[in-house]
Image (cartoon, helix red, strand yellow):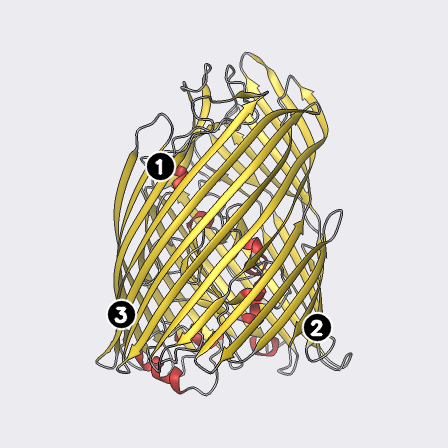
Amino acid sequence: MQSMAQANNEPPTETPNAQRLERIELSARPQTTTELRRQSTAAKQIYDEADIQKFGDVSVSDVLKRLPGVSLSGSGPALRGLGSYTRILLNGEPAPPNFDLNNLNPSQVLRIEVARAATADQTAEAIGGTINIILKEPPRSRTVEGQARVSYQYEQPAVGLNLTWGERIQGSTAFNVPVSYFEWNNFNAVRTTSTVTNPSAPAAIGTRLADRHPFGRGFNTSPSFNWKVNETSSLNTQAFITQGQWRWSDLATDRRIIAGQPVFADDSRNFGNWLNARVGTTYSNSFDGDQRLEMKAGVQYNAYDFTARAFRDGAERRLTLGESKNPTFTQSGQYSRLVADTHTITAGWNFEWQDWIGRSRTTELGVPLLPIFEGQNVEARVARYAAFVQDEWEVGKRLSAYAGVRGERIATRSKAVGESSEANTATVVSPMFHLKYKLDEKGEHLFRSSLTSTFKAPDPMQLLARPLVSALYSDLTRSNDALSSDRIGNPALKPELATGFDIAYERYFPGGGVASATVFYRHVRDLIRNRTTLETVSWATAPRYVTRPVNFDAANTFGLELEARGRAGTLLPFAFSAKTPLDIRASLNYYQSRVQGVPGPDNRLDRQQPWSATVGLDYVLSGVTPAPIRLGGSLSFTPGYRTQQSTEQSIEFVRSRTIDLYANIPVSQKMSVRLVANNAAPLASENTTVYSTLSTVTTVSKPRTWCGVVLSVKG
């Protein structure tokens, strides 16, 4: 929440209540991210430009994977191992559909806020938590920056360029224009071994070795314009546009028949294009010294198309063409007022309308695979209406409290070819409570607790009753196997509901260091899980295994999170001198979950690891060059684990480890060179999926180290 007394031409800061609002206004220096974290009533971790750009990463995904309690799963960043329950926000608004954080350069980001407990003014759709990525706004003075990079992972170098120009005009208006061009060129050597057991025939066992090569290019820009209308009001407009094209190939280098007649995946060459465009305007007015009104409106348009070609024995066998369009409109507002000098009351609303229209056409040897569906539109529409009210209360010098409630109505409508329109409406009321108690007046030791009600609505794609045929078994006169199933949506899905509790102890050290310990618990009802069954279907003449999402049962998850960061001499005074120029970052996380209705052991939530650990070191080396050299790195580790996904199906992952290294060498006061090695000494990732005694698939992927050189210049 922003200070109602804050000047409108300054970047927004997190402000938890009225008394602290006044202290922020009188402060002669910008507050550090550690101070903002300490002052917030709700638990929140904040990372500024120095934290974000420390390693010279080329994408925000690489930044996130080093943050405490954040891991990367197949669907993107995950808090507490809960990838599908982690909400990604861009400037406080939901990120565009299919938004890839690998395509956003850290140089465009002002700060990242990680909140593990929800507040009513943002969103209640955050069972695992939210990651809010805030883009840069116009600067207070002229800013000209440039960054060029060259990286290598496979075959040929990839290049990137970032330019930023910011100006303030006549004191009342300012603009900022960042532009990024990026390329990627990656590689994985993949070994897939499949076993299919049929009671009436010998087991079919085969191994396919392949090279997977994803590469592509694109650009993005996030221009913003600030106009200070008068002393109390301002108007901010910011756009975010990203466009690009990708290529992906999966070409077998060897196929080995071990037993029977295994079915091997075809070679494939795929390419596509994407466009995400968003523009939003915010009007804010602080009046009477203790009131604030903020109004927002935005439009968004996303388009995506792809071509997928499958080859067998060197000849094209299957061709798939697809496209989708996704227009969105949002409008929101909130009004805040200081009451009785200790309460900040905020009330507001949110509205979002989102439409998704897609079509695809697959032909097998020139013949439409599913004649009824091919080339026809499938549609999904989502309308959200939300209202909230919250009270941030400074109870005393040591105790702060937060109470809020958010009501949200979600109306969905989906339609596939040959099906009647399916409508579904859900209303969710989410109360939220937070407490913060300082053990001392300075707040060097404090406790936090949170009790929240949150939810997760089904994705539009989960609602569409349009079948997708297994690429391995496209002959619809034959059955498939359980791990190569056809897929279809479920228009009757309901939102998942969760009740959660968090309690944390935080210790703040002089110089900005912090250590914390957090215990959390979540109970999830109407859990959505994919269920695979053998069915008689309308699109095939033989029985087929079909996977569809269903509201399954309930689940419980709990864990312990430990974090520490700061100067080595502060955190470990018995081992380091206070003058040692070494910073330490470390986290250790322990997670457990149990899904009801699935037999144990290992009936955990999908892709939630049992524990994870991260440690990072940053050292300042002086005396070698006129300006200090900064060296550092980080190590992340996750053990191997097994997940029982259903009564029949399980998946097992081997341990994973990531080592990232960097060296920042200043050339002059305005120029520096950064050397980066991500995923040094890579481990092969491996997972094994088993369906009863019928099917087993083991996939081993071996990546290569990503090396880069980054040249940064500031004007």
Question: How many residues crowd mark 1 within 10 Å: few (<14), some (14–19), many (20+)?
Answer: some
**Distance CA(mark 1)–CA(mark 3):** 40 Å
Q: In the rendered image, is residue 602 in sight?
A: no
Query: Does residue 459 sit above or below 373 in this rendering?
Result: below
Nearer to us of marks 1 and 3 is 3
Q: Is residue 574 above or below residue 448?
A: below
Mark 1–mark 2 Cα distance, whole angstroms, equals: 54 Å
User: Which residue does the numbered mark 3 point to in the structure image?
Assistant: 335
Give the farthest residue toward the right: 624
- Count residues near mark 3 (Cα–Cα under 10 Å), then give few for <14, some for 14-19, many for 20+: some
Label 3 residue SS: strand
Q: Which quadrant is the N terminus positioned in?
A: bottom left
Image mark for residue 305: none
**Is tag 1's residue or tag 3's residue first in the polypeptide sequence?**
3
Looking at the picture, tell me which residue is in the foreground, 339 or 279.
Answer: 279
Residue most extreme to the top? 200
- Identify the residue position indicated by label 2 in the image: 672
* Amino acid type, label 2: Ser
Q: Of marks 1 and 2, which one's residue comes earlier in the chain?
A: 1
| Residue occupied by mark 1 | 552
Q: Nearer the viewer, residue 264 or 259?
A: 264
Q: Indicate which label's residue lies in the foreground, 1 or 2.
A: 2
Q: Position of residue 505 (x, y in %)?
A: 42, 69
Mark 2 falls on what kind of element?
strand
**Amino acid, disc 3:** Tyr
- Residue 299, image quadrant: bottom left
- Alpha-carbon span between mark 2 and mark 3: 45 Å
Under circle 1, the secondary element is: loop
Q: Earlier in the sequence, mark 2 or mark 3?
A: 3
